[in-house]
Image (cartoon, rainbow, N blue to C red):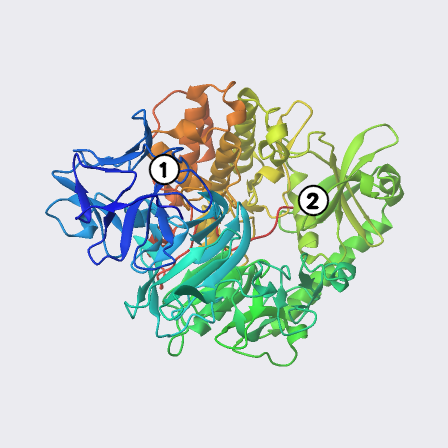
Amino acid sequence: MSLVLQISYASDSISAGQNITDGQTIVSPGGNFELGFFSPGSSKNRYVGVWYKKLSAGRVIWVANRENPLNDSSGVLKLTPQGVLTLLNRNNGVVWSSNVSRSAQNPIAQLLDSANFVIKEGNDNDLGDAIWQSFDHPCDSFLAGMKFGIDRAKGLDRYLTSWKSVDDPSLGDFTYRLDSSGYPQLIVRNRSVVQFRSGPWNGLRFSGFPQLSLNPVYSFGFVFNQNEIYYHFNILNSSVPSMLVLNENGIAQHFSWVDRTHDWILYSSAQTDDCDTYALCGGNGNCDIASSPKCVCLTGFMPKYPSAWEFGDWSNGCVRRTELDCLGGDKFLKYTGVKLPDTRQSWFNVSMNLQECEQTCLRNCSCTAYSNLDIRGQGSGCLLWFGDLMDIRQFNENGQDIYVRMAASEVGGSSSGNTGTRKSTGIIVSTVLSAVLLLGIMAVFIKYRRDGQIFRCCHQNHGEDLDLPMFDLTTIVNATNNFSEDNKLGEGGFGAVYKGVLRNGQEIAVKRLSENSRQGQDEFKNEVVYIAKLQHRNLVKILGCCVQVDEMMLIYEFLPNRSLDCFIFDQEKGVLLDWPRRFSIINGIASGLLYLHRDSRLRIIHRDLKAENILLDNEMNPKISDFGLARSFGGNDSEANTKRVVGTYGYISPEYAIHGLYSIKSDVFSFGVVVLEIVSGQRNRGFNHPDNHLSLLGFAWTLFRDRKPMKLVDPSITSTFNPAEVLRSIHMALLCVQQNPRDRPEMSSVVMMLGSESALPYPKQPGFFSEESVSEASSSSGGKHQQYSANEMTISDVQPQ
């Protein structure tokens, strides 16, 4: 570090109107830190920064103008009478500014002995009232007394960003940030790619930091409340300076100063071996650095791609050998001494005990594991996971316990840990009867099959016959070129979808049930029952089915432009959907949903409305598809309850995810999400704004509240959009995604909103699963426990079909 010739002020501060020029510095009261101009490494550029003064290897820990260096020594740092720090170049151009909106009387800028550079009222020593402070804007270093995390009340997100190189303090590729999209954890990213994760805080330490234990150097803690979420540490011995640094290679390292050697020593590192690499073993894999190979599948799981696994490519992870029963026959297998999985798809409750946690997990088919939230004492709180378990590793000490959900046949007679899982005779009988009934239906299908034949399917729940063409298996095999990969359009939980061409030249889409797909069998029956009764220009049209031998298939009209997500989430294809087309699609989806909810013979709730399930014909007209999860309502019904929550997280409504309550307002919520995705070109699921931790819904609502809704608009349509239509679409969508279902409009009102210019009510905060919003949802429904959740987390995470 080059300091040129430094002349220190006698003071630790400057007042309004005073300057610091290149070559001058101010020093903290105890002489520990110094602020002035410097050049890093071999660079000739000049920066304003704070560094350790007393240490021979004085290290820069904060840089003001890291993105805008001065190219000579003409820079001047001054404090304006309004209390704003500005860095000026030789032409009096502003290179950097503290950019505060609040003015001060008699302001001073002071360098404290903590290294915090603050702007405050001259007679005010309360840092809580500081106008501005450098600790709220860290660079690559985290020091004692700083807060690492989020302050919602002040709108702050304090995180580290690496230097680009030792000679260049500008923003590097790596960030170290507290992620609150599930239960909070610290994450290192290389741009947008996760490199490392700390695991959740367990009351003593972060789950992935077994080395974070009581020590003579520093103490540490974690604060989590409605206003703030942050990690902090304090030095126990003031004579031993300590700091955490995110280096240029993305490694978070904790250093301590040793007087004897006059140098910094590495006290601990976040990433110590290969198993600290994020998701090295893929989903449902466990990394053990002491084993060979390092990666093994969890018990009851097997490699998704065995050949790749054998060659050391573990990235695709593991899949279950036996699917979950979800009817009360599942058990839990206890793993000890592990780093808990990624919590970005998690749910938590601070007041539940472990037994209540287990029962909550069992009541939801999508829950795959649970653990205590706090391991102190006898343990408390509940943390649930949904979907694949990512980034588990084994520790020799200070690991944590987790209970992974398994099919009973994989666990054996008893599971390790608490289960309370029991099979009931009624469940077994009903399962057998369902299987017999399904076999009977298939036998009838096989008996009466032939190409083009009309069959009549009696559905007991509705007492009506369904007339659908039955296609011969040979016809479908020929149409799809024997289900060739070239004809394959996609794959989901139901099975694969293929394009086909009949002998008469008609193009079809064939949905083929995958072998042993219990979910698919239920969805097959659902599709046949519901979609055969529906006729609307904005619903996909079913042409028939094929049930022969071991095959169960649904045949639909072929839609050449595939699904909506292929366009709005693709930068290149997105330009093909200009605003008029997007607004037409929004209106078409609304029209189709209104038909389902009000005008069809059956009152139907879709339950899985998402961009992937909106198909587009050759004129970009939308067609709602995939009725496998749909449910019908009687004329006077308003809502229903289920223990098996299904759907896709990011689209599912809060009351359904948490309490299993679904209604037409659940579809309205999903519709609102889709509209915001159409307008923005961004997915709600996995949305990660660089300046905050809101979901797409929360971000849209914040922009609307701040009267900046147009900042949400997809840049690819800004040249074609109608501002009034866009604003109305955003406003309407925010009404649809409100936290409380009673506040959401019905689809009949939505259609009127889109077609008129009447004033709309102001939208309340959306149900984007912040801790506060879920807590409010819980209390309004009379829930026993205080419940928490986070942005985009859902109790069910059935992947896109």
Q: Dot 1, crowdedness within 10 Å: few (<14), some or many (≥20)? A: some
**Residue 258, numbered label:** none
Residue at the image point whose x is 79% and y is 31% from the top: 507
Q: What is the three-letter code of the residue carrying label 1?
A: Thr
Residue 134 in the image: above or below residue 354: above
**Residue beneath label 1, please?**
702
Q: Position of residue 729 (x, y in %)?
A: 45, 28
**Image quadrant assignment for residue 627:** top right
Query: Residue 530 or 655: which is nearer the viewer?
Result: 655
Task: Calculate the distance from the C-alpha at mark 1 to the C-alpha at mark 2.
Answer: 42 Å
Say left or right for 556 vs 773: right
Residue 175 in the image: above or below residue 214: above
Check disc 1 and report its element: helix, strand or loop: helix
Say left or right for 144 vs 579: left
Q: Position of residue 738 (x, y in %)?
A: 39, 41
Residue at the image point whose x is 77% and y is 56% from the top: 515
The single residue placed furthest to the left in the displayed view is 123
Q: Position of residue 197 (x, y in %)?
A: 50, 59
**Residue 528, numbered label:** 2
Query: Residue 183 or 415: which is nearer the viewer?
Result: 183
Residue at the image point whose x is 29% and y is 70% from the top: 237
Check disc 2 and report its element: helix, strand or loop: helix
The single residue placed furthest to the front in the displayed view is 5
Q: What is the three-letter code of the residue carrying label 2?
A: Val
Q: In front of the other: label 1 or label 2? A: 1
